[in-house]
Amino acid sequence: MLRDVRQGLRTLVRQPGFTAVGVLLLSLGIGLNTAIFTVVDTLLFRPLPVDRPDRLVSVFTSGEDGVGAATTSYQDFLDLKSSNRVFSEMVGHAMMFASISAGGEHRLAMGEVVTTNYFQAFGVRPAIGRAFRPEEEVGEGAHPVAILSDAMWRRTFDGRADILGQTFRLKNRTYEVVGVAPATFPGIVPGIATELWIPLSMVDDVEPVGINDVVPSATGRTRLERRGARWMFVKGRLKDDATAVMADGDLAGIMTRLAEAYPISNRGRKPRVLDAGVSRLMPDVDEALRPAGLVLLLAVGLVLLVACANLAGMLL
């Protein structure tokens, strides 16, 4: 075998033009396949970077017509969290754009506004500092604290060791850094690298990204107080003896009671519980992404096949 390898290398060296074209053909085919597979794998197949991802489900709320899967209001989230019998944890979160000024730069950052049990529920321990505290979810606008991603810590703050207690401007308010997430945790939205997290109490400083469904509310003035302001995505961690089907039935009973108690904002609203490994983004988006991803994989596979056929022809 070693003699064959040496003979092959000598042949390639004697024909540099042929060698360059062959390497280029294989590089294009393999490189394109690797890039596309990485994207498709991240969006559709790779498990979420959390503890026991198989026990996570996504919880959606339907529209008034009872069709579809959309976001949930904070007030509904609190009732679902306190009354269910199937989840050990429930987490509310929403992607956001934030205008930040830090490290001498001014730019838009992609982050998440989250309930304070976010890191605990997903089994993620900050690499530096601490996670959010329960009291930081109470009192709107009272807790301007943030946890940075590893990438933002290194890029914006030069990876400084004394990052805890450092400040930056988000919108028109000064935020204090209380932690840095591990490098292995980019957030729970596939394909999007979250740069920072802030507690739910500070949601009025940012603009949640996603489905904002607003209907009249009997009470409340703010985004957190209005039951008809639906903007949060919800994840639940199933208890060991619970299933997604059981969770769907349990939450359906709670939503029925909420519809009777709050007919103005909750009429016709129903829950939809899906395995978080299947529901990667939104059910409608996932249904469009799966066939598109398979078509892309097939297309780049054909590109690699053509490259190999061309090289085989050259060799002959």
Image: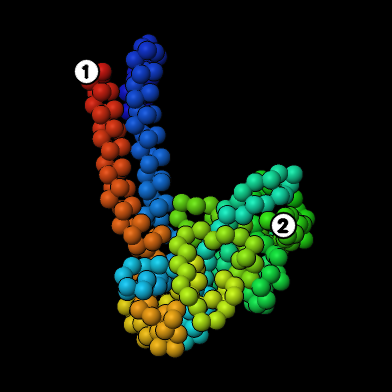
Say which mark, if any, is on residue 116.
none
Name the residue at 77% across, 57% down.
Answer: 166
Name the residue at 37% across, 71% down.
Answer: 63
How many discs appear?
2
Residue 123 is at least partly visible in this image: no
Name the residue at 33% across, 67% down.
Answer: 68
Looking at marks 1 and 2 on the same chain, the residue that comes earlier in the sequence is marked by: 2
Q: Quadrant of residue 58?
A: bottom left
The amino acid at mark 1 is Leu
Left or right: 237, with 25 as reference point: right
Q: Residue furthest top?
A: 14
Q: Nearer the viewer, residue 227 or 14?
A: 227
The residue indicated by pointer 2 is 172
The amino acid at mark 2 is Asn
Look at the image and tell me in which quarter the N terminus lies: top left
Mark 1 closeness class: few <14, some 14–19, many ≥20 residues within 10 Å: few
Mark 2 closeness class: few <14, some 14–19, many ≥20 residues within 10 Å: few
Q: Nearer the viewer, residue 213 or 198?
A: 213
Q: Percent x, y for residue 85?
A: 43, 86
Name the residue at 71% across, 71% down.
Answer: 142
Q: Nearer the viewer, residue 52 or 206?
A: 206
Q: Percent x, y for residue 159?
A: 71, 49
The residue indicated by pointer 1 is 316
Residue 222 is at least partly visible in this image: yes
Q: Percent x, y for residue 247?
A: 37, 80
As drawn, 279 above or below 265 = above
Describe the element under mark 2 as helix, strand or loop: loop
Q: Nearer the viewer, residue 148 or 1?
A: 148
